[in-house]
Amino acid sequence: MQHIVDNLPYLLDGLFVTLYVTALAWLVMMATAFALGFARYYGNRPARWSSGLVVGLFRGTSTFVMLFWAFYVLPQFGVTLTPIVTGVLVLGITEGCYLAEGVRGSLASVTRGQAEAARVLGLSPWQTMARVVLPQALPTMIAPIGNFTIALLKFTSLLSFISVQDLTSRMQSLRYQVGDSIVLFGVLLVVYYLLSTALGWLFRYLERRASVRGTGRPPEAGHGAAAAPPVTEPTGGEVALR
């Protein structure tokens, strides 16, 4: 444990990199998920087909392999990205493709009749989306957003493969120096657990707030609670498939 104390500033810098990459990748994930989710549900046939192709491609391939291609293969075609940019784009787009199906499902939970009624009342398509569809769809999106945010945080540990000096990479470097694998990776396990737990609490709170705002009652009252499952971490099988 003394090794942790002696190298605390070094490890805290790695933790900052982990959180920084997670935050940037989260923005990419959200933009990707909403763009593809809307295209999958509201787009014309070419938009649905092309968005479905992108979703299928990223959901059907390994995140590790995608990182390898983006960082080591693309430079051979004249496209060179920094390690952090590579990690942000690959993780964000990959998790965004998973989340896109959750966005599409949430949009589908709002009946088309409500949007048509809003149009009859004179609302523009943007007003219909902002005032009718999204207020009802967002509460059911929060749980999957929370799930994939937690997954995103965990997958940042893969970025040591492309030389990103995140917390996992720095802990690995320290292990090579002192050889105390059990303590170092035990501390690493606890840190990821605490971060994931904090994110879970945050999204459960947001889910309750959204349910209260959308229905006037908390989820426990029975209105809106069944529409979205509680925030849980992705299963081991789901993570293994990536």
Image: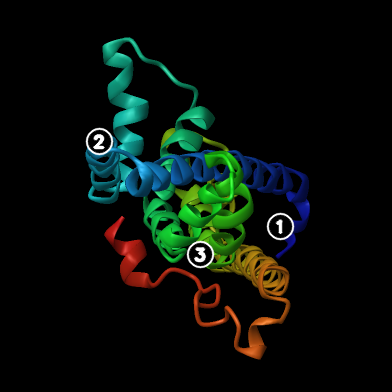
Label 3: how many Cα within 10 Å (few below 14, some 14–19, many 20+): many
Give the Cα distance between marks 2 and 1. Answer: 49 Å
Residue 212 appears in which quarter of the rendering? bottom right
**Percent x, y for residue 96?**
43, 47
Task: Decide which of 183, 96 is in the foreground and name it.
Answer: 96
What is the number of the mark on residue 50? 2
The kind of residue on which mark 2 rests is Ser
Give the Cα distance between marks 3 and 2. Answer: 25 Å
**Percent x, y for residue 158?**
44, 47
The kind of residue on which mark 3 rests is Asn
Residue 25, above or below 41: above
Q: Earlier in the sequence, mark 2 or mark 1?
A: 1
Is residue 211 found left or right of 63 in the rendered image? Answer: right
Decide: marks 3, 1 in contact (CB < 8 A)?
no
Task: Decide which of 101, 113 is in the foreground and name it.
Answer: 113
Residue 12, above or below 110: above
Q: What residue is disc 1 on?
A: 4
Q: Earlier in the sequence, mark 3 or mark 2?
A: 2
Task: Report the quarter where the N terminus lies.
Answer: bottom right
The kind of residue on which mark 1 rests is Ile
Give the Cα distance between marks 3 and 1. Answer: 30 Å
What is the number of the mark on residue 147? 3
The residue lying at 41 percent from left, 37 percent from top is 90
Decide: marks 3, 2 in contact (CB < 8 A)?
no
Q: Secondary structure at mark 2?
A: helix
**Percent x, y for residue 193?**
60, 69
Label 1: how many Cα within 10 Å (few below 14, some 14–19, many 20+): some
Q: Is residue 24 visible?
A: yes
Task: Decide which of 149, 111 is in the foreground and name it.
Answer: 111
**Percent x, y for residue 94?**
38, 45
Residue 136 appears in which quarter of the rendering? bottom right
